[in-house]
Every structure is written in structure tokens, then in C-alpha cells.
DNA sequence: GCTAGAATGCTAAATATTTAGCATTTATAG
DNA sequence: CTATAAATGCTAAATATTTAGCATTCTAGC
């Protein structure tokens, strides 16, 4: 009963389609912390992360960045602008040197209509993300703080492509992502560290034992 | 800046396609509280609610039903079995006399590949639901209990098609859906009732003033 | 109409969580 | 190497929430 893993759009695409997409769109490069999309901007299109990572969140009145999630190589975002007629929910900014393939509305629609396997891959991606989101909402409702944090760390490692287990997360980010206070986060992280399933750094958390972290 | 509303699959489909779907699938009838799908059953396919409503949730060890959501006429479910290779997350049971159009995996795939407008409508539906889910997770993290309940009531009325504003929800259901205790739910409902935006019944809640309920 | 079961109402003690500080550690820019 | 800002560590009081009861109200089915 191994759980199916969340596969990125690029994973789901036939190789030749990625080439077509490269032709249809344009690759843009960003440096660390550079803004890619403003929150609620009115651009429409699909963005595919070719290299690097993208952080989503927003700035508070005091100019602090509040993180809601990170996506890594192969993942895409912007579906909501194409299919749900909604504005972008979050600001997107580069995390490290990042290359993003941007496909505008018209190019996207043309490909979507003429390439069933592209349409299918996109739908699979969105459906997987829906499942993740429902799952996350479930976490928020049912789990203890400690367990919620554990699941968030594992999810971030997975979607962000942090295969070495080192996550660039501040305790403030975790607090914001879970809607709890920094004091509570600190307390729970302390417990997890004592159990030796994670180790804490300055602005980062390392997953030391993913297996045991998954079942608290 | 009127927010785009969540449109059901049937709303999004061209009329002739609904006919095709009826031919490709089969309509099944259910009576109140009859089980439609067991949680984690291994059936694969799309279900479209033609008439009536479907409640999603699960039974506890003590045999009590815990509600997570209700979908009304025109809405569909089961996308996750088709596109994300996951088991059904919840048990589905009829709420009142209900007719559901069931489309099996093969029929679905055939139509999906040969009818771009069907593929698009399905993707739009899933994307909208993703947006709803992200929005709900945001509610859980940011809002006061009172505000969370208000949003849940409005969302249930919308997705369940309860146009008269009378929602068949027990306080226990709200508590479970939000991951809080029944005492807290009762307290918040009391406040909302005093503000005359809802009125409480036995096993039901009536939205008395949707506009003021939306901005607590 | 009665009755059993279900749902709600109510309460206070126990527990969990936040708030609002300030101290300490760490990384970065100069 | 140092100064600075950022992040974490720590604390206690204030607040919010749950727990675990039992009482009351409501409804469906007989």
C-alpha cells in the first residue's frame, strides 16, 4: 500500500511535449528573491519551473514576507488564472537562481486543445494539487501541532524538491503556514529535535529521519 | 469586483455534451441516507449529481456519521480516482432522493479524449474546487471561530445548492468540519444568532442575512 | 399522544495557546 | 572584524479552548 507520490507536471509530460512547450513559451531567469508575479496581478498563463524554486506568500504592512509554500523543479503554477477566472492568490518570488517557462494564455489554449496528452498532464497535476490541499486542510483540523508541523515539513521537502532534507524555513514561516504562534512552533520543534527526527538551524530545518517524522 | 462564483460541471458543459454523458454512463437512484460509495473503495469514475444532494464524510467507531461536505445538483466528484490515482477520501451517501450519473473509467477517458470541451469543463471544475480548498485552508488558519463558521455556512449553501438558506447541519458537523469543539461552535452560533444573521433550528441552521454574514 | 434517541444548552475545571516582552545567538554586509 | 539586523530562545500572565459532565429540548416513529 505504498502511497502514490505527487508527480510534477514535467514528470507527467511526454518528452517531446516539453520541447513544444519551450517553443510555445519563453524562459525567463530570476535571481534570488526577485519577484516573479505580484499578488493579484492580472496576468494569465501557466508557469513551469525548469530550474530553481519559487516561494509563494505575501508581504505584510511591515514589509515582512510571509511564506505559504515552495514549489521546486518540474512543478507548475498559474492554473487558477487559466481555468478558474481568479486572480493570483499569492506573490511569487524566486528562491535562488531560477528559470521559469512562461506560457501565455493563447499559446496554452492552443496546445491544450490540440495535444490531449498535455491536457491530461495538466489535469493530473491540478487534481494532485487538489488532493494535497484537501489533505492539508484535514491536517489543520485533526492533528496536534507537533504532527501538523511534521507533515508540513515532509510536504515542503517533497514539493520543493529539497532532496537533502534541508528546508529553508524560519519558525515564523511555519507559524504562519499553520496559523499558530511562533512560541507554539518553537515548542513543538524542540520536541521533534529531542526525538532526533529533525535538527534545527538558523532559518532552516533539517529532516534527520523522514520515516520516523512521518509517524509521530 | 464581484467575485466569480463556483460554477458546477453541468453549468460548464454544452447542452449536447450532457446528453452524450447520459448515454455513456448510467443514472442510479438513491434514497435518503443510502450509501453511494464506501470510503476508500476502489471504484474509478466520475459521478455527476443530476438531482438531490450527496453528503461526504465517514463513520466513527461508535457508528456516528461525521460530515465533511455536501454537494448539490450539477456538481461532480470522483476526479481524484481518475486523475490522481488515489482512493476515495470519504464515504458518499445520498441526502434525500438523489439521482447520480455514473461514468466509468473507460467511457470517461473516451469522452475526455475526443471532446475538448468536456476536457475543459472537467479541468475548470477541478481547478475551481482547488481554489475553494485553498481558500478553506486559509480560513482555517487565519479567521476567528465565528468568522470560520460564517464562511463554512455560506460555502455549504453555495456548493450544496441550498438556495433557501436552510442548511441541514448539526453543530457536531460544524465542529468536525472545522476541527473545533461543539462548545465553541455553540458559543459562536449564539453570537451570530444574536446578530440576527442566522437562526438556529434542531439539526439545521438558516442563513437569515447572507450579506451581513459574509462580513462579520 | 408517547417515548426513545438525538441534538442542543449549559457549566466549571483543566488544559492549551497566545501575547508581549526581552535576551541570546547567528549570519551578513561593510 | 565588527556592527547590525534577523532569527531564535525563553518566560509568565492573559486568554481561548477543550473536556466531561448532566439537563433540557426537539423530532420521528410507534
Image (cartoon, coloured by chain):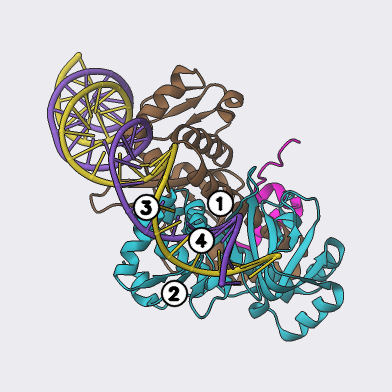
Chain colours: A cyan, B brown, C yellow, D purple
Residue density around tag 4, few if under 14, some if 14–19, many if 20 or more, within 10 Å: some
Query: Relative to D16, is A137 on the left or the right?
Result: right
Q: What residue is shown with label 1?
A: B133
Closest to the observer, B19 or B143: B143
**Letter of the chain that mark 2 sits on in the rendering:** A
Q: Is residue A7 visible?
A: yes
Whether labels 1 and 2 belong to a single chain: the reply is no
* Label 3 vs 4, first from the N-terminus: 3
What is the spatial separation of the Cα atoms under label 3 and label 2, in whole angstroms?
20 Å
Q: What residue is shown with label 3?
A: A142
* Label 4 vs 2, first from the N-terminus: 2
Place of residue A51 in the rendered image (x, y in percent of width and height, measured from the top left): 70, 77
Place of residue B76 in the rendered image (x, y in percent of width and height, measured from the top left): 58, 53
Q: What residue is shown with label 4?
A: A170
Which of pointers 3 and 2 indicates the residue nearer the eye? 3
Which of pointers 1 and 4 indicates the residue nearer the eye? 4
Contact flag, marks 3 and 1 (Cβ < 8 Å): no
Report the magenta residues as a range.
B1-26
Amino acid at each position: 500500500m505504498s502511497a502514490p507520490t505527487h508527480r510534477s507536471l514535467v514528470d507527467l509530460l511526454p518528452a517531446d511535449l516539453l520541447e513544444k512547450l519551450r517553443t510555445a513559451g519563453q524562459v525567463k531567469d530570476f535571481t534570488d528573491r526577485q519577484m516573479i508575479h505580484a499578488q493579484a496581478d492580472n496576468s494569465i498563463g501557466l508557469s513551469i519551473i525548469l530550474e530553481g524554486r519559487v516561494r509563494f506568500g505575501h508581504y505584510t504592512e511591515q514589509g515582512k514576507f510571509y511564506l505559504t509554500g515552495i514549489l521546486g523543479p518540474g512543478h507548475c503554477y498559474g492554473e487558477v488564472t487559466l481555468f478558474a477566472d481568479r486572480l493570483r492568490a499569492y506573490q511569487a518570488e524566486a528562491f535562488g537562481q531560477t528559470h521559469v517557462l512562461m506560457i501565455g494564455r493563447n499559446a496554452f489554449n492552443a496546445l491544450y486543445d490540440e495535444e490531449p496528452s498535455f491536457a491530461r498532464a495538466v489535469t493530473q497535476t491540478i487534481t494532485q494539487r487538489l488532493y494535497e490541499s484537501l489533505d492539508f486542510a484535514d491536517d489543520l483540523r485533526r492533528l496536534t501541532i507537533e504532527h501538523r508541523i511534521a507533515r508540513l515539513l515532509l510536504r515542503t521537502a517533497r514539493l520543493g524538491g529539497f532532496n537533502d532534507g534541508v528546508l529553508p524555513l524560519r519558525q515564523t514561516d511555519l507559524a504562519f503556514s499553520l496559523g499558530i504562534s511562533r512560541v507554539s512552533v518553537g515548542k513543538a520543534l524542540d520536541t521533534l529535535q529531542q526525538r532526533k527526527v529533525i535538527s534545527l538551524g538558523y532559518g532552516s530545518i533539517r529532516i534527520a529521519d523522514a520515516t520516523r517524522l512521518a509517524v509521530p
